[in-house]
Structures are given as structure tokens and as C-alpha cells.
Amino acid sequence: MIVTRISQVFLALLALAFCKTGIEALINPQAVLANVGIDLNSPAALSSMRAVYGGMHLMFGLFCVGGIFKNQSTALLLVILYTAGFVTGRIVSWIADGTPNEFVITWLATETFSLVGCTLLLFLIWNKKRTTNP
């Protein structure tokens, strides 16, 4: 029961973060990307950022909301895949391109924490199911 409740709280926090980013990027993608020095100077660039940082993040957030109430494992797995991709990309970039700004380092720490937390919770859920249903 405690693992279920912790997973629900964790997914709720992730849902808030995803939805916040998604809504902000749908409304003003330039403001979101200004934090990393990206200038969106064409309709194609704005469209791509509204799609990836806006629509996709909003849908991920809503998926996490659904995961709070049903199938937490799938929602946690989605976040694991998402954060593993971001963490991998950020580490490769740090090695290849040099130290990023404070904003990116903060997100790397947040994504790493989310990756580890979701992985641990998913392992605990799977282990509980395995030991409950041998």
C-alpha cells in the first residue's frame, strides 16, 4: 500500500511538471526555449517546439494523471524512458560540447532524480506483484 501511495504522489508531481511545461510551451514556446538560448525564428521552429515541448509534454502529463488511478507501472515506465533519453542526451552533450548553463544542469539533476525514483518504484511494484502472485 505504501509503494502505491508513493507512486501516486510521485506521478502527481511529474504530471504537474509535464503539464506546466506543456501548457507554457503551447502558449509561448520562445519563452520556454529562451532558458537554453534557442531563438525560434520561423513558423516551422515554433511549430516543432509547440509540438514537442507543448503537446507532447501535456499528453505525458495527462498520461501520468491516468497512471495515478490505473496502471501505475505503465506511467512509471513512460517516465523512465523519457528521462533516460534526456539524461543520456545531456551527459553526451556535456562530454562532447562542454558544461551547460545552470538551467540545464538543474534539469539534468531533476531528470536523474525522476529516473532513479521511477525505476525504484517500478521495481518495487513488480517485486510486490511477483511475491504476491508466485
Image (cartoon, rainbow, N blue to C red):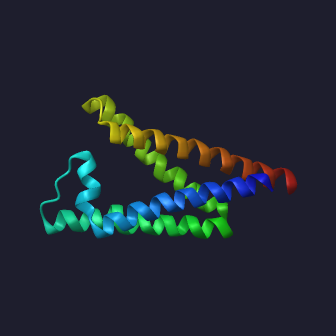
Quadrant of the image occupied by residue 88: top left
Q: Position of residue 127 (x, y in %)?
A: 77, 48
On screen, residue 31 versus residue 59, left or right, reads left
Quadrant of the image occupied by residue 50: bottom left
On screen, residue 125 versus residue 50, left or right, reads right
Q: Is residue 84 above or below residue 52?
A: above
Quadrant for the N terminus in the image:
bottom right
Could you tell me if residue 32 is visible in this image? yes
Q: Position of residue 81 (x, y in %)?
A: 50, 52
Report the front residue among 83 and 17: 17
User: What residue sits 86% from the left and 55% below the top?
Assistant: 132
Q: How many marks?
A: 0
User: What residue sits 56% from the left and 57% below the top?
Assistant: 13
Report the front residue among 77 and 9: 9
Report the front residue among 115 and 19: 19
List the single residue furthest toward the left.
41
Q: Position of residue 36 (x, y in %)?
A: 26, 46
Q: Is residue 43 above or below residue 34?
A: below
Q: Position of residue 7 (x, y in %)?
A: 67, 55
